Every structure is written in structure tokens, then in C-alpha cells.
Amino acid sequence: MDHKKFSYTDLLLILILTILCALFFYTPILNETIVKSILGLLLIVFIPGYVVIAFLFPRKSDLSTIERLALTVILSMTITVLTGMVLNYTPWGIHVITILTPLVVITLVLCVATFWRRSRIPYEEHLRLDLGNFFRRMKLSFFQESKTGKILSVIVAISIVLALSSTAYVIVMPKQNESYSQFYILGPDGKINNFPTTMSPGQEGNLIIGVVNNENKQKSYRLFVTSNGEVLFDEVFTLNGKQKMEIPFNFTAGDPGIRKMEFFLYKLPDNANTYRYLYLWINVTG
């Protein structure tokens, strides 16, 4: 049988998986799928190490299958950790995209380099993807072990898979920050002071009311402002995740006396229970 068509199958498969991973992580519509997690796991624990080993040891006789597999996983995790350490000292910081982007670039560059290097050695020495032969060797080696050896092999294999999966999951699917919404009032100069607390009858006052959506998703709010039972402001609005809105609020002081201005924020659809509450005492002098 002519096996030449399989000579670069492994590199082609690595390229396809890497491009798919980039597509799923950089496209918002595809971002929240289980496929994204699987591809991200492969990119972190297998793909970069495989192309590095394939470039350094292009001949099938350079390493045994077990050695190549072990070095692939160890080197992939090492590359991921080193990438994170370097990014920690850059303005971009450590994030899913900032970690995966250099891994994608490294993989694509090394795929091209490995293709070039493999093409320069005799075809008979090419490393080729032969999963059937690989699993046959693994099966034969496993059944030749003693009963105790088999149990230990299974335990070690499961431990490695769980450890790698947990590490990759934390990187690919980081824990979301606690979801909440900020609600605050500022003075007319945009600072947390200089509030119009002493006013004359008929004098105009200015405030800034701020709402920040940290719910990690789009959210609708109702803002309700009263002064001694009189409704001064009532508005419904929607904010996207991480979006901030600061609303200029103007009011006119009424008759002399002490007034309590109250600010209510409702997180819809709950229109009955106040989510956040603020107040401001205003002394209207005669």
C-alpha cells in the first residue's frame, strides 16, 4: 500500500485543530460551547508540545511512541506555563485569549517548519500518524504486565488525565467574578463630595447617578428617585456586561425644610424589591 498520502497527516490534523480552536475562541457566537473547551484543552496539553517534538525529532526512529507522547504532554504544559509567566509582566496580563494567542502562533509556525524539515529527510524515515499501530503496541504492553502493574498503570493514567484536565479547564474556563451591579451618586464635578446639601428655595441642584453592570451579561434596570414622597425621576434602561452609565440629574429645591432625597435601583424583572438604595439629606434654608 502507498503510505505517502499519510506522511503529513499529523501536521494537517494539528493545523485543522489549531485553526478551529482560534475560530471558536475568537468568534463570540461559538465561544460558549463544549467544543471550545475540548479544543482549548488540546491546545494547552498536547498540540504545542507535539509540533515541537516533531520538529526536533522528525524521524520515526528518533523516539519511541511512549517517549514521544510523554514529552509531548510535558512540553505542552511547560510552554503554557512559561507563556503565562511572560504575559504576567506585559500590559496584556494573563487571560484566556492572551495565553491561547501565542500558543496558536507557535503551533502554526512550527507546523510549517516541521513540514519543511520532514520533507528534507528520506521518505522511509518520516514520522507518520499510525494510530492503529500505536494502540496495538499500547495494548500489547499493557497485557504483558502483571496484575499489580496493570492496576498501577490505570491509576497513573487516570491521575494524569484528571490533573491535566483540571489545569486546562481552569485556564480555558476561568471562574467568573462575582456578579453584581454598582450604584452610586457623585457631585456635579464627578467626585464623591461637594453634594448640594444646603440650598435656597428654587435653587437648582445637580448630581450624577451612576450604574455599572458587573453581572457578566446584559441586564435591565429601573432607576427611581423621590424627595419627601415626590417622584423626581423614573426611568428604565438596559446595560451590557461591564457597561457603565452616568446620568446627569437636575432638580430644584422646594420650600424651606429638611428634605430626604432617596435613590432606588431595581434589577428587572424584579420591580418590587429594591436592589440598591442611596439617600441624600438636603437642607433648604429660608
Image: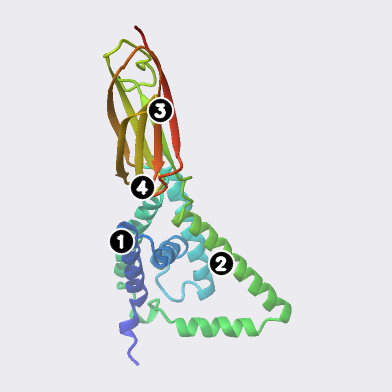
Q: Nearer the viewer, mark 4 or mark 3?
A: 3
Which amino acid does the dot numbered 4 rest on?
Lys
Please tell me which of labels 1 and 3 falls first in the chain: 1
Disc 1 is placed on an element classified as helix
State the residue at coordinates (34%, 54%).
101
Q: Nearer the viewer, mark 1 or mark 4?
A: 4
Residue 219 numbered tag: 4
Q: Is residue 35 above or below residue 145?
A: above
Q: CA distance from mark 2 to mark 3?
A: 56 Å
Q: Quadrant of residue 58?
A: bottom left
Disc 3 designates what residue?
262
Q: Nearer the viewer, mark 2 or mark 3?
A: 3
Disc 4 is placed on an element classified as strand
Disc 2 designates what residue?
161
Q: Is residue 189 above or below residue 83?
A: above
Residue 31 locus on image (x, y percent): 35, 60
Which amino acid does the dot numbered 1 rest on?
Ile
Disc 2 is placed on an element classified as helix
Residue 144 locus on image (x, y percent): 65, 84
Marks 4 & 3, CB-CB < 8 Å contact:
no
Residue 29 numbered tag: 1
Residue 128 locus on image (x, y percent): 39, 78
